[in-house]
C-alpha cells in the first residue's frame, strides 16, 4: 500500500475512534438505524484504476488523434476525494447527492504527433497535460418497497460531468523562436440518470448499501451514455459515526459536436473506497 494511502486510512480510522469513544455515555446510546433516520453523509477516499481516451477534432472534417491519457500521463491508480449524502425529507421521498474531483497535471514526451483540435503537436515534443474532472450528481428517490430491515428506492436525477483536457507544448525553432501549441478542450456533459438503490440491515450494526444507475441519450450532435454500479458495507459502532468500505465502477461515453468541443470522450474508473459515515 502506498504511503499516501496509509496516511488516509490512519486519519479516517483515528477520526472514527474519536467519534466512537466518547465516554461511558456512548455505550448507553441506542443502536443506529440508517433505515429510519433523517439521512446520512459520507466522505472518504477512493483508489481506482482508470481508463480515459479523448479525441479533440479539428474544425475540418478529419478526425483528431485519440489520446490514451492514462498511458501518456500516468493517470491510473491514484487516490481521490468523494462525498455523498442522503436526506429523507419525507419517509418515502429522498434527495441524494454526490461529488468527486479527479483533476491532475502531468508531463510527458510524446512518441507520435497529436492532432489536438486545430493544432498539430509534433513527435518528440515535451507536453504538459492538465486534466480537470469533476462529477456532481443530484437525484430524487422514491421508496418503492420498505420493510423493517431493508428498503428499495427508484431514482431520477442529473449527473453533471465537467471535463477540461488541455495539452500544451512549447516548440523552439530557428527563425521563429519559441511558441506554444495545443489548447484546451472543455466538455460539459449533463446526463439524466435513472437507477435503483437498496439498503439492507444485515445485523450487528452492519448495513449493505448498493445501487445501479444508467442512462443513454442521443440528441442532434450530442450522444452519451452513463453507467454506475456501487456496493458498500457500513459498520456503525456508535449512533452517529460509522466506517464503510465499498467498490465503485463508473463509465461515461460522450460524443459531441457542440460549442468549443468536437470529438469523443471515453472514461471509466473502478476500484475500492473507504469512508466515514455520519447519520443524523
Image: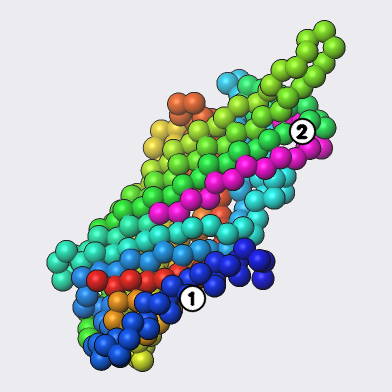
Q: Residue at x 60, y 33 (%)?
A: 166
The magenta segment is 99-114
Disc ID at residue 145: none
Across and down, in percent, residue 227 comes to 46, 58
Across and down, in percent, residue 273 comes to 51, 68
User: Residue placed farthest to the left in the image?
Assistant: 90
Q: Nearer the viewer, residue 16 or 259?
A: 16
Disc ID at residue 126: 2
Tell me where residue 228 sits by quadrant. Answer: bottom left
Would you say residue 99 is visible in this rendering? yes
Across and down, in percent, residue 136 comes to 39, 50
Residue 220 in the image: above or below residue 28:
above
Question: What residue sits right under mark 1 in the picture?
Answer: 13
Q: Residue at x 57, y 37 (%)?
A: 165
Task: Give the left or right position of residue 148, taking residue 195 as reference.
Answer: left
Q: Residue at x 67, y 66 (%)?
A: 2
Q: Residue at x 52, y 37 (%)?
A: 164
Question: Would you say residue 62 sits in the magenta stretch?
Answer: no
Question: Would you say residue 100 sits in the magenta stretch?
Answer: yes
Q: Give me the C-alpha separation between circle 2 and circle 1.
A: 42 Å
Across and down, in percent, residue 251 comes to 51, 55
Q: Quadrant of the C terminus?
A: bottom left
Task: Give the left or right position of residue 230, taking residue 130 as reference.
Answer: left
Q: Quadrant of the N terminus?
A: bottom right
Q: Nearer the viewer, residue 125 or 160?
A: 125
Amino acid at each position: 500500500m502506498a504511503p499516501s494511502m496509509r496516511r488516509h486510512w490512519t486519519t479516517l480510522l483515528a477520526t472514527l475512534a474519536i467519534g466512537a469513544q466518547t465516554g461511558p455515555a456512548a455505550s448507553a446510546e441506542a443502536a443506529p438505524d440508517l433505515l429510519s433516520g433523517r439521512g446520512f453523509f459520507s466522505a472518504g477516499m477512493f483508489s481506482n484504476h482508470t481508463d480515459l481516451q479523448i479525441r479533440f477534432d479539428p474544425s475540418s472534417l478529419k478526425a483528431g488523434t485519440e489520446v490514451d491519457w492514462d498511458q501518456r500521463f500516468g493517470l491510473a491508480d491514484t487516490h481521490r476525494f468523494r462525498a455523498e449524502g442522503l436526506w429523507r425529507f419525507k419517509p418515502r421521498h429522498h434527495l441524494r447527492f454526490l461529488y468527486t474531483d479527479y483533476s491532475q497535471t502531468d508531463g510527458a514526451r510524446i512518441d507520435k504527433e497529436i492532432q489536438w483540435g486545430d493544432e498539430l503537436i509534433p513527435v518528440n515534443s515535451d507536453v504538459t497535460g492538465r486534466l480537470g474532472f469533476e462529477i456532481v450528481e443530484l437525484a430524487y428517490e422514491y421508496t418503492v418497497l420498505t420493510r423493517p430491515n431493508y428498503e428499495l428506492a427508484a431514482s431520477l436525477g442529473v449527473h453533471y460531468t465537467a471535463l477540461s483536457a488541455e495539452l500544451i507544448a512549447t516548440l523552439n525553432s530557428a527563425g521563429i523562436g519559441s511558441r506554444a501549441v495545443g489548447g484546451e478542450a472543455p466538455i460539459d456533459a449533463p446526463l439524466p440518470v435513472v437507477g435503483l438503490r437498496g439498503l439492507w440491515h444485515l445485523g450487528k450494526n452492519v448495513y449493505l448499501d448498493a445501487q445501479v444507475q444508467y442512462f443513454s441519450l442521443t440528441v442532434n450532435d450530442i450522444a452519451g451514455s452513463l453507467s454506475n454500479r456501487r456496493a458498500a458495507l457500513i459498520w456503525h459502532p456508535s449512533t452517529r459515526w460509522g466506517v464503510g468500505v465499498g467498490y465503485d465502477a463508473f463509465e461515461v461515453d460522450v460524443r459531441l459536436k457542440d460549442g468549443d468541443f468536437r470529438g469523443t470522450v471515453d472514461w471509466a474508473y473502478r476500484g475500492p473506497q473507504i469512508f466515514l459515515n455520519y447519520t443524523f
